[in-house]
Image (spheres, rainbow, N blue to C red):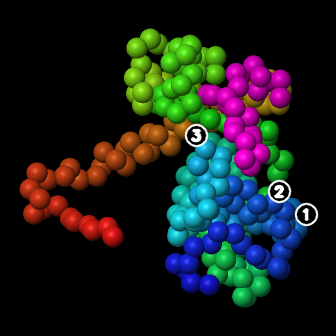
């Protein structure tokens, strides 16, 4: 399979297919491990679009690997140091190369742990109606996409394919998974966001300032 050919869904015969998500295909390796393949499917507002984006899964995998390793001091993650190509048949390696990883089998929590540093999307809609997001009061007069005074934790339900996640108050999350676990998820999610945001800001500040002279600036063309 060509590295540039988009993969809408995988068809590995050497492993048992467990589930196709909005973007990822999950296979069983053994009782302790899973193979996650990140396809080129595109999901928008919880709906899978018909046209895949070539290379999307590879980019997503590179990003995932980077952040899993960068932030593993905050909380242990499920990533294992196993090459996916070693677990599938030779003819199937093109489906996993650069777009898959091997992970521990874990039981997922039935919630989405969402941290917001800016007011946008469904949070902006909620704020317009109630001046709150997920029951969290916010200052008056905020503008759409404005940075919040501090990051806030706004959990949601984990929706099935074809349905939408729904924002829930933290008290509802406590009922779903217990107060102790809910508090740990909230605190570590905010720490993950804060450290990632700080790293991104420092990386952006180190970029060269664009010159006012077009002759000194690199150019690119898109077709």
Residue occupying image coordinates x 37% and y 49%:
203
What residue would you read off at disc 3? 192
Magenta segment includes 173:
yes
Lower position in the chain sequence, tag 1 or tag 2: 1
What residue would you read off at disc 1? 31
**What crowding class fits label 1: few (fewer than 14 Cα within 10 Å), some (14-19), or many (20 or more)?**
few
- Distance between mark 1 and mark 2 Cα atoms: 8 Å
Q: How many marks?
A: 3
Residue occupying image coordinates x 20% and y 50%:
209
Lower position in the chain sequence, tag 3 or tag 1: 1
Q: Secondary structure at mark 1?
A: loop
Magenta segment includes 201:
no
Farthest residue, direction front: 50
Compared across the picture, whether 92 is left or right of 152 comes to right
Res. 129 in view: yes
Farthest residue, direction right: 31
Residue 29, quarter of the rendered image = bottom right
Q: Residue 20 location, x and y as percent?
A: 76, 60
Q: Which residues are magenta?
A: 153-176
Name above or below for residue 131 compared with residue 168.
above
Res. 65 in view: no
Residue 202, quarter of the rendered image = top left
Q: Nearer the viewer, residue 219 or 45?
A: 45
Q: Residue 197 location, x and y as percent?
A: 47, 40
Q: Residue 162 location, x and y as percent?
A: 72, 47
Q: Secondary structure at mark 2?
A: loop
Q: Secondary structure at mark 3?
A: helix
**What crowding class fits label 2: few (fewer than 14 Cα within 10 Å), some (14-19), or many (20 or more)?**
some
Residue occupying image coordinates x 82% and y 51%:
106
Lower position in the chain sequence, tag 2 or tag 3: 2
Compared across the picture, whether 178 is left or right of 166 comes to right
Q: Which mark is residue 105?
A: 2
């Amino acid at each position: 399979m060509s590295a540039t050919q988009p993969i809408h869904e995988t068809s590995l015969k050497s492993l048992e297919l467990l589930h196709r998500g909005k973007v990822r295909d999950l296979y069983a390796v053994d009782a302790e491990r899973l193979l996650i393949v990140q396809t080129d499917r595109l999901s928008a507002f919880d709906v899978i679009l018909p046209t895949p984006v070539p290379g999307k899964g590879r980019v997503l995998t590179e990003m995932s690997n980077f952040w899993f390793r960068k932030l593993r001091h905050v909380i242990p993650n499920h990533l294992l140091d196993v090459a996916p190509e070693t677990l599938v048949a030779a003819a199937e390696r093109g489906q996993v190369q650069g777009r898959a990883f091997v992970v521990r089998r874990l039981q997922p929590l039935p919630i989405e742990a969402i941290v917001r540093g800016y007011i946008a999307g469904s949070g902006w809609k909620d704020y317009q109606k109630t001046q709150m997001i997920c029951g969290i009061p916010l200052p008056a007069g905020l503008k759409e996409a404005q940075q919040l005074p501090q990051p806030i934790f706004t959990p949601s339900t984990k929706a099935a394919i074809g349905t939408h996640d729904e924002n829930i108050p933290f008290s509802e999350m406590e009922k779903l998974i217990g107060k102790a676990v809910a508090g740990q998820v909230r605190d570590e999610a905010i720490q993950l966001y804060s450290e990632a945001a700080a790293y991104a800001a420092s990386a952006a500040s180190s970029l060269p300032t664009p010159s006012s002279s077009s002759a000194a600036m690199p150019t690119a063309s898109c077709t």
